[in-house]
Image (cartoon, grey):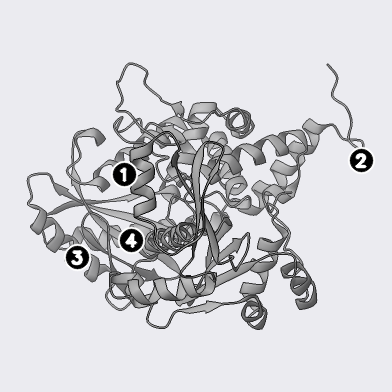
Amino acid sequence: MKQKNTKNGKSNSQKKKDIYNKVLARVTPTKQDLLEEKELFLEIKKQVETLEGKHSHLEWCGSSARGTHLKGDRDLDLFVMFDEKLSDNSLEEEGLRIGKEIFNGHIWEMAYSQHPYIRGVIRGFDVEVVPSYIVKTGAEKKSAVDRTPFHNKYIKKKLNLHKRQEARLLKQFLKGIGSYGADLKNCSLPGYGVELMIVYYGGFESALKGISKWKNGEIIRFNSKKTIKRFDEALVLIDPVDPQRNVASALSNEQFDRMKLASKLFLAKPDMKFFFPSKRKIWSKDRVRKMLDKKEVIAVKASFPQKFLSDIVWGQLRRFLRKLSTQLRENDFEVLRETIWSDEKDIYYIFELETLKLQKAKKVLGPKVKDEENVERFLANKKKVLSGPRIEKGRVIIEIERKEVRAERILKKFLKSTKKGERNAIRKSLKRPNVLSEKDLLKIYKGEFAEFFTHYLEGKESFE
């Protein structure tokens, strides 16, 4: 069937090709970029080779080593390799020692995976120096990072130059729609997972077609002969290097649905906005005020805890968001939306409720009338009955008085009672928590928060 022409006279197919070419021109690193990162790697490699120690060699891993990274992503993931017979303590000590030698005279910090490692900045590159064991296969790993060198070998073998460009397209597409990165802030696919999608589907457009048809619990595997353990995630992307691992384990249900929707919409009507969303115009305060007049919004402000790894912090923040939301629900507030935003200085937990204030009387549904024993127990345990008991649809009903009816007070009471019980990052963030009303939100409505809050109130995806 002949494809219909778009308004500008181009077919849908030609329009997509034009978009792909423009995107790749923007996201493909230049020859100079590639030269600079290779020179730095060779320089560090030579330095490691001259150091005495128990290490074997240095391996360059990650998307930059595989040739699938995006322009501007100046990351070098370097793995110092050790014999698998070396003890965990020696691996840790040697890895840190070599890392500190490499960063001598540069800014660095200690980070943690299964083992502590050193990361920092050298000549504008974000460099990580990770100790790893030399093992026979990724499935025989001694530590979680041991499979990473095998990821490198697998992707480099499976993706030629053309498919590496296809991987770049898919990475930028997911980045554009806000669905890229397995960190706990984004809860989506890691770079390696995106590359595997290209291996599996064969290209960018084929991957979008596949994504658009995903069913919940979708399983993607690369070797059907190998058995896999049972997974319970929206997408199961079996690691060909380690079949007992789901590469997409961080992908949230929300991101799963977002990827499906964006893929369908792009295939139907291709547009650059999926790759590079236009910056939204920030609403005026007056417009925000008018919208808030039609909604019931409340927030909790806290401080972003410093001296903690960002990924660890975001995991704890999301758990605390759920705790706050649960507290509201348990006190009969219907939570319509909940979200969290931070500029990594301040944190805002935001809740949209059906109402900010409940009535004093609370209707309590009791047992069926014919269940005499439980009816008697139910009525005996209820004191200060405002109304009832009465019968509605075959059940005993009473009304009691709520202890607290304002969402603001529920949150303040909860914050006060839980502050001491929380650990680590959350305890640090709750030193001076503050419950914000809609008027308070208007007072801080500026800068990055204004951009976020406009987007929140619009309630639209960036690609719609």
Q: Position of residue 374 (x, y in %)?
A: 35, 41
Q: Earlier in the sequence, mark 1 or mark 4?
A: 4
In this figure, which residue is indicated by the disc labeled 4?
A: 128
Is residue 68 in sight in this rendering?
Answer: no
Q: Position of residue 232 (x, y in %)?
A: 38, 34
In this figure, which residue is indicated by the disc labeled 2?
A: 8
Q: Earlier in the sequence, mark 3 or mark 2?
A: 2
> In the picture shown, does residue 422 fall above or below 65?
below
Q: CA distance from mark 1 to mark 4?
A: 13 Å
Label 3 close to label 2 by CB (< 8 Å): no
Number of numbered discs on residues: 4
Label 2 close to label 4 by CB (< 8 Å): no
Q: Dot 4: few (<14), some (14–19), or many (≥20) neighbours within 10 Å?
A: many
In this figure, which residue is indicated by the disc labeled 1?
A: 148
In this figure, which residue is indicated by the disc labeled 3?
A: 96
> In the picture shown, does residue 108 fall above or below 370?
below
Q: Dot 1: few (<14), some (14–19), or many (≥20) neighbours within 10 Å?
A: many
In depth, the one of 230 and 7 nearer the eye is 230
Is residue 331 in sight in this rendering?
Answer: yes
Q: CA distance from mark 2 to mark 1?
A: 46 Å
The disc placed on residue 196 is none
- Amino acid under label 2? Asn
Q: Earlier in the sequence, mark 1 or mark 3?
A: 3
- Amino acid under label 3? Leu
Q: Dot 2: few (<14), some (14–19), or many (≥20) neighbours within 10 Å?
A: few
Q: CA distance from mark 3 to mark 2?
A: 59 Å
Task: Kindly indicate the quadrant of the structure image that contains residue 341.
Answer: bottom right
